[in-house]
Image: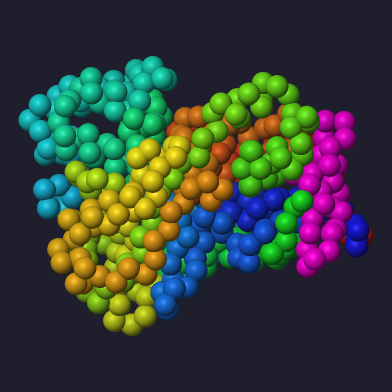
């Protein structure tokens, strides 16, 4: 052991949830240490350079006007995003349709003249009459329509937002997100890549007296009396013992339990985690072209496809992401199944076939920069929406944040920011208004 230090708060993982939590803790005067195993912050909301293009590692859509933006404003971090208009369009029979005016009625009635039953079901959901929690989106939709295009749209919306197929997601969670919360309407893209945006939160942690350790790893959390007392952190090849009053983990509930040992958690919590925590997968295709492959400035969600769910031309609003004279696009596919095992090579091939179907002369006009499959320990999402675990754990001073512990039917980076806000509020209430600890 090469050293020992004490902090008020230890945050594990610098993904969106961990960054929001650390920035809020430091802003409130808590001596905060944020530990990240990779060489950059952001996690699955970060950016890497590929052949001169700034390619995002996962999330591209940054929601504004909610708790995520509130976090940036609170801690004084720049919230630099550009909003495409319209932000969302649907490609139906080769035509891009804007439903920003008219909403679901325009979409459904534009596809079928027999949409009254479906729109009625949505209306009842808006009024609070929800389907049974066990009913999938596909099964709920089957009760209203057999229209193939509508089924494809709903599948691709499940895939685009939650990285699952329509038979893998509870209808109640889908309807809560889209109908009651009216989510995923207000978003933009970062001209410096998602990493550039997230660095603002990291800088805020340091600016408020905290520390951010990259290429460092929490090896173990040590528990005494139903509380985490300390952590063993490996940094620069040496171990540091870190004593902390509160611990917030963005590593995911399963990884957090492993750091402590299962014997420190009660049977009910472990049973729920083992039953409900199921990661989902997606396929991310980054594409360069000399001319735009899409005319829409925002995200286009497709109709009938094999695996492709949506696509965006990021340089329509953020030309800085590509070298001069180039366009950068990102397309997302979701495998079947998205939860569980699948043939990776075959699923990638089907996604690429969809791109060739949807984009005229794709092979001649486009250059694929990379294809990434997010699954396993680096999933698209750590849980199926509606089946998230609670932020609180069996241990009194340990919380999880991020996409495994979202509020019911929340999605995107916004959901990670909300989990961080709530966890920090609980951590501050537990710790009380005492002054910040001093590093030793």
| Residue at x-position 73% and y-position 61% | 216
Magenta residues span 220-247
Horizontal arrangement in the rendering, residue 7 relative to residue 85 (left or right): right
| Residue at x-position 47% and y-position 73% | 49
Horizontal arrangement in the rendering, residue 261 relative to residue 183 (left or right): right
| Residue at x-position 29% and y-position 81% | 325
Magenta region, mostly helix, strand or loop? strand
Number of numbered tags placed on the structure image: 0
| Percent x, y of residue 130 | 36, 20
145 lies above or below 421 = above
| Percent x, y of residue 85 | 27, 58
Tell me, yes or no, whether the highlighted magenta stretch contains residue 240: yes
| Percent x, y of residue 359 | 18, 61
133 lies above or below 70 = above
Front residue of this view, candidates 399 and 169: 169
Q: Would you identify the image quadrant in which residue 51 lies?
A: bottom left
| Residue at x-position 63% and y-position 66% | 39
């Amino acid at each position: 052991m090469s050293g020992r230090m004490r902090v008020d708060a230890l945050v594990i993982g610098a993904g969106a949830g961990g960054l929001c939590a650390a920035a809020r803790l430091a802003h409130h005067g808590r001596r905060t240490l944020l530990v990240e195993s990779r060489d950059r912050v952001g996690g699955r909301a970060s950016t890497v350079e590929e052949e001169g293009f700034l390619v995002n590692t996962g999330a591209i859509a940054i929601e504004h006007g909610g708790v995520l933006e509130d976090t940036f404003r609170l801690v004084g971090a720049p919230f630099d995003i550009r909003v495409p208009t319209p932000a969302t369009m649907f490609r139906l029979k080769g035509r891009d349709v804007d439903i920003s005016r008219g909403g679901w009625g325009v979409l459904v009635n534009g596809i079928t003249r027999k949409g009254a039953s479906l729109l009625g079901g949505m209306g009842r959901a808006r009024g609070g009459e929800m389907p049974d929690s066990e009913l999938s989106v596909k099964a709920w939709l089957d009760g209203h329509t057999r229209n193939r295009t509508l089924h494809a749209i709903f599948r691709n919306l499940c895939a685009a937002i939650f990285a699952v197929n329509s038979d893998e997601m509870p209808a109640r969670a889908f309807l809560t997100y889209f109908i009651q919360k009216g989510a995923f309407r207000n978003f933009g893209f970062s001209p410096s890549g998602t990493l550039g945006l997230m660095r603002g939160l990291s800088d805020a942690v340091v600016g408020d007296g905290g520390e951010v350790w990259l290429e460092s790893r929490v090896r173990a959390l040590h528990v005494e009396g139903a509380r985490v007392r300390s952590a063993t952190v490996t940094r620069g090849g040496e171990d540091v013992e870190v004593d902390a009053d509160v611990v917030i983990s963005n590593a995911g509930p399963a990884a957090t339990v492993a750091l402590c040992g299962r014997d420190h958690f009660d049977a009910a919590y472990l049973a729920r985690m083992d039953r409900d925590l199921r990661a989902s997968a997606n396929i991310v295709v980054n594409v360069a072209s000399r001319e735009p492959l899409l005319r829409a400035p925002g995200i286009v969600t497709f109709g009938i496809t094999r695996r492709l769910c949506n696509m965006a031309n990021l340089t329509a609003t953020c030309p800085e992401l590509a070298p001069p004279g180039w366009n950068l696009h990102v397309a997302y596919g979701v495998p079947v199944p998205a939860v569980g095992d699948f043939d990776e090579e075959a699923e990638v091939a089907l996604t690429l076939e969809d791109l060739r179907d949807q984009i005229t002369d794709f092979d001649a006009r486009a250059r694929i920069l990379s294809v990434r499959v997010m699954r396993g320990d680096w999933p698209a999402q750590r849980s199926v929406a509606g089946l998230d675990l609670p932020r609180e754990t069996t241990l009194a001073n340990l919380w999880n944040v991020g996409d495994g512990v979202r509020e019911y039917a929340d999605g995107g980076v916004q959901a990670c920011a909300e989990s961080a806000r709530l966890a920090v509020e609980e951590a501050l209430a537990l710790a009380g208004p005492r002054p910040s600890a001093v590093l030793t």
